[in-house]
Amino acid sequence: MSKEEKVIPYKIYLEEDEMPKTWYNVRADMKDKPAPLVNPATMKPVTEADLAPVFCEDLIKQELDDDTRFVEIPAEIKEFYKMYRPSPLVRAYCLEKKLGTPAKIYYKFEGNNTSGSHKLNSAIAQAYYAKKQGLKGVTTETGAGQWGTALSMACAYLGIDCKVFMVKCSYEQKPFRREVMRTYGASVTPSPSMETEIGKKMLAEFPGTTGSLGCAISEAVEKAVTTPGYRYVLGSVLNQVLLHQSVIGLEAKAALDKYGVKPDMIIGCAGGGSNLGGLIAPFMGEKLRGEKDYEIIAVEPASCPSFTRGVYAYDFCDTGKICPLSKMYTLGSNFIPSAIHAGGLRYHGMSPILSKLYDDGYMKAVAVPQTEVFEAAETFARTEGILPAPESSHAIKVAIDEALKCKETGEEKTILFGLTGTGYFDMFAYERFHDGKMEDYVPSDEELAKSISELPKMN
């Protein structure tokens, strides 16, 4: 890269209305790329042909492309984005006042659409490419329900079918999220189920299980490969998803640059990595190229601590062990998290991109218990007027902690965090918290050691 090309003026990749006209692929600026996906049958890096029965053709190309920095957003997707983008970047003046902190707190709010979350950014892209390929429909999994809701909206808009496997505990805790999906025409099945061979096996092996994202992924993949005219789509973890979600960070950076604001710290919740990866993308690009530095913090639940207590190794992306192997921070694909209320963060692994960046020291991670998360959510709701999703509230918790540290030291740091969505379908969780019935669960070292010991053996 020449000296003239080194500094990337992200603003030129925005439309006049400040909505991105391209996605940004952070892998292009990573000197050391994420390890490739591996075919468990051959133990060799996956090819386009390996992935063709599972994913859409154009999405496979995006998944495997480590070199193209900017990818043009198709016109039909941009038209859809205009319904709710650019999303608001808000200065949390009232929260700052409540905390009595000299810190400046900003949040990028992704809940201003009917799905209530950032997931719609990738859902419309994946549904678009499925329709472009001439497919009848897609299958997927969903944890808390945000991804399933977003995908059902996107499929309804484009006129294709949508089959959703929803983690059983969320299916039962969040019936209204389920009904929104059905309103948009999706079929919704609690996972594990009797609809797939993998579901039957899981129910036989773990009677009464509350399910997991890994299990729901297995069921959705099996359904896709056994149903003609369907492909599988995923709402997090994959490279293609972080690519689509980069619109979050591109908009946030453009807005901050416009007013001459540079965040010292960027904070996001981390389950599979879609929100965090999207928020930090252009900032991480600057960090990778040596242009600017930022402190980047991933926040995960103490009950499912992939970064902070997992290992960096090749593992299956799903519990049924039918997906490719991915090198990532993982607790083991056999690990079934407790039924915490942040259902979107109940995944055993982490994005391979974020895993590589974390392992290389470009970001750090913290794990927090859910009762403290809901205390932070309540503080935010009472000061900023938005009821946050449990997932987002992990980032709120650490943003508050960091702002209080600034109060103690007198430092005037600027903090940016991702408010991934709203919590209006999570009232069961808020009820449990207010009634004092919410408990913190932290897996023991023995539990984690068992699941980690079952990782696939690599040559």
Image: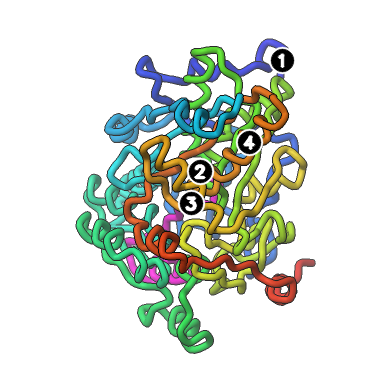
Q: Nearer the viewer, residue 163 or 334?
A: 334
Q: Nearer the viewer, residue 265 or 94?
A: 94
Mark 2–mark 4 distance (CA, rounded to whole Å):
24 Å
Q: Residues within 10 Å of mark 4 (few under 14, many from 20)?
A: some
Amino acid of disc 1: Ser
Q: Which span is picked out in magenta?
A: 218-241
The circle on residue 275 is: 2
Q: Please report the residue visible at 52 percent of the width from the left and 85 percent of the height from the top.
A: 206
Q: Nearer the viewer, mark 3 or mark 2?
A: 3
Q: Secondary structure at mark 2?
A: helix
Amino acid of disc 2: Asn
Provide residue 46's location: percent of width, then percent of height.
Answer: 61, 56
Q: Secondary structure at mark 4?
A: helix
Q: Please report the residue visible at 39 percent of the width from the left and 28 percent of the height from the top.
A: 88
Task: Name the residue carrying label 3.
Answer: 391
Q: Considering only vertical position in the picture, is 389 above or below 303?
A: above
The circle on residue 182 is: none
Within the magenta stretch, is there residue 167?
no
Provide residue 47's location: percent of width, then percent of height.
Answer: 59, 54
Mark 3–mark 4 distance (CA, rounded to whole Å):
21 Å
Q: Is residue 73 left or right of residue 212?
A: left
Within the magenta stretch, is there residue 220?
yes
Task: Name the residue carrying label 4.
Answer: 404
The mark nearer the N terminus, 2 or 4, is 2
Which scheme is used to colour this image of the protein?
Answer: rainbow
| Label 1 close to label 3 by CB (< 8 Å) | no
In which quadrant will I find the C terminus?
Answer: bottom right
The mark nearer the N terminus, 3 or 4, is 3
The mark nearer the N terminus, 3 or 2, is 2
Q: Secondary structure at mark 1?
A: loop
The circle on residue 2 is: 1
Mark 1–mark 2 distance (CA, rounded to whole Å):
31 Å
